[in-house]
Amino acid sequence: KNDTVVLNQTLEFLNRRAPNPDPHWDYHGSLFFMMTIMTTVGYGSFTPNTVGGQIAVVIFGLIGLTVAGLTIVTLTEATDRLLDKLVPNEREHSNTKKALVTLALILAVWLLSALLFTLSSEGWNFWIGFYCAFVTYTTIGFGEYVPGDLRHKSMLLMLLVLVGI
């Protein structure tokens, strides 16, 4: 009997609503939310409404940040190997050329993202798309601009965000 009381009290505690519940919790919205935790973007466009949700954020955040860190290391090593092949190994200017090629690749991803964000978000111009790409990929993520389809429809845009970061 005591076990049942404790279980019921625990479930009641975990399901207690926080102030300002958000109606956007569907499959795509939840996937978007998990992606913002894993990438540390944190747009602030939605938040967990229950203590259970907040606990899940902490647990998933710890796992997701570990996976994201390992992914960043792996992608950095792969990019470095690719740049070694693309940039001739001239001792004097090798690092400068690699830095310029890397900068060009980053800019290309941001420009492509800006275009896709602009096309997928009603009322956006290219500058807003570029700005959104910048605050997303630098994980600043203020939240004043969140690509519309990223939150609700397009897995392609979510993948682009993951690659861009």
Image: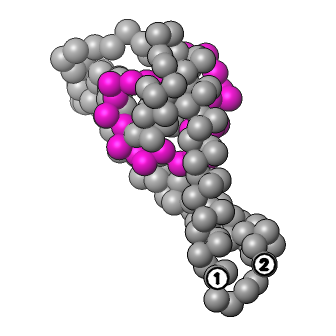
Q: Which residues are magenta?
A: 137-165
Residue shown at the point (31%, 34%) measured from the top left = 142
Closer to the chain start, of discs 1 and 2, is 2
Name above or below for residue 84 compared with residue 64.
Answer: below
Of the pair 13 and 29, the residue shown nearer to us: 29
The location of residue 71, given as percent across then percent down, is 60, 58
Give the position of the N terminus as an image quadrant: top left
Spatial CA span between label 1 and label 2: 9 Å
SS at mark 2?
loop
Q: Quadrant of residue 155?
A: top right
Report if residue 141 lies within the magenta region: yes
Of the pair 91 and 120, the residue shown nearer to us: 91
Report if residue 42 lies within the magenta region: no
User: Which residue is denoted by mark 1 in the rendering?
Assistant: 93
Tag 1: amino acid? His
Tag 2: amino acid? Pro
Name above or below for residue 63 compared with residue 131.
Answer: below
The location of residue 19, given as percent across then percent down, is 18, 17
User: Which residue is denoted by mark 2 in the rendering?
Assistant: 88
SS at mark 1?
loop
The location of residue 105, given as percent across then percent down, is 65, 53
Q: Quadrant of residue 57?
A: top left
Residue shown at the point (62%, 43%) measured from the top left = 109
Is residue 118 visible to us here? yes
Of the pair 120 and 152, the residue shown nearer to us: 120
Q: In the drawing, does residue 54 fall left or right of residue 127?
A: left
